[in-house]
Image (cartoon, grey):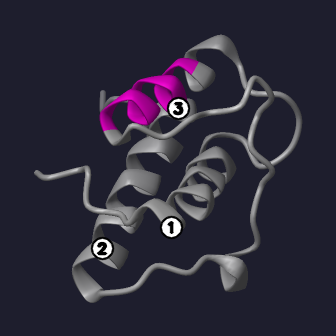
Amino acid sequence: MDIDVFSADELDGVFRVLRTALNPSGPLQPGERKLLETYSRITAYSLAGTDPFSIRPEEARVDGAHRRKRLVQLASIAALFSSPCAGST
């Protein structure tokens, strides 16, 4: 899965989407922050010392169907990271 597909001008919004998927309000937990830091290294994005602001769905903008699909997939992983599914019994 290629995960470095976004243009430089889309990355602010991408990180806001991922932040919102991790935790839409309140500060990020250390593990959540580490996920953003790791992805910022992959994409060569300069992540600020503070958590990115959350974003409303209608504010998210990514060009191209492939990149939009990838953002949904990454946001899904981020959401599962902070709220994992319980295993079946």
Question: Which residue in the protein does label 3 denote?
Answer: 36
Residue occupying image coordinates x 89% and y 35%: 26
When the figure is inspected, residue 7 is found, relative to residue 64, above or below; the finding is: above
Would residue 26 be found to the left or right of residue 17 on screen? right
Badge 2 amino acid: Arg
Is residue 40 in sight in this rendering? yes
Q: Position of residue 51 (x, y in %)?
A: 76, 34
Q: Nearer the viewer, mark 3 or mark 1?
A: 1
In this picture, residue 71 sits left or right of residue 26: left
Identify the residue under disc 1. 10
Specify few, some or many for label 1: CA neighbours under 10 Å numbering under 14, 14-19, or 20 or more. Answer: some
Is the Cβ of the residue at disc 2 closer than 8 Å to that at disc 1? Answer: yes
Q: Position of residue 80 (x, y in %)?
A: 46, 40
Please report the residue visible at 56 percent of the width from the left and 49 percent of the height from the top: 18
Q: Could you say where residue 73 lies in the image, as x and y percent from the top left?
A: 33, 60
Asked if residue 87 lies in the magenta stretch, the reply is: no
Most distant residue in the left direction = 1
Q: Give the CA distance from mark 3 to mark 2.
A: 18 Å
Secondary-structure class at tag 1: helix
The crowding category of the residue bearing disc 3, from other C-alpha atoms within 10 Å (few below 14, some 14 to 19, many at least 20), is many
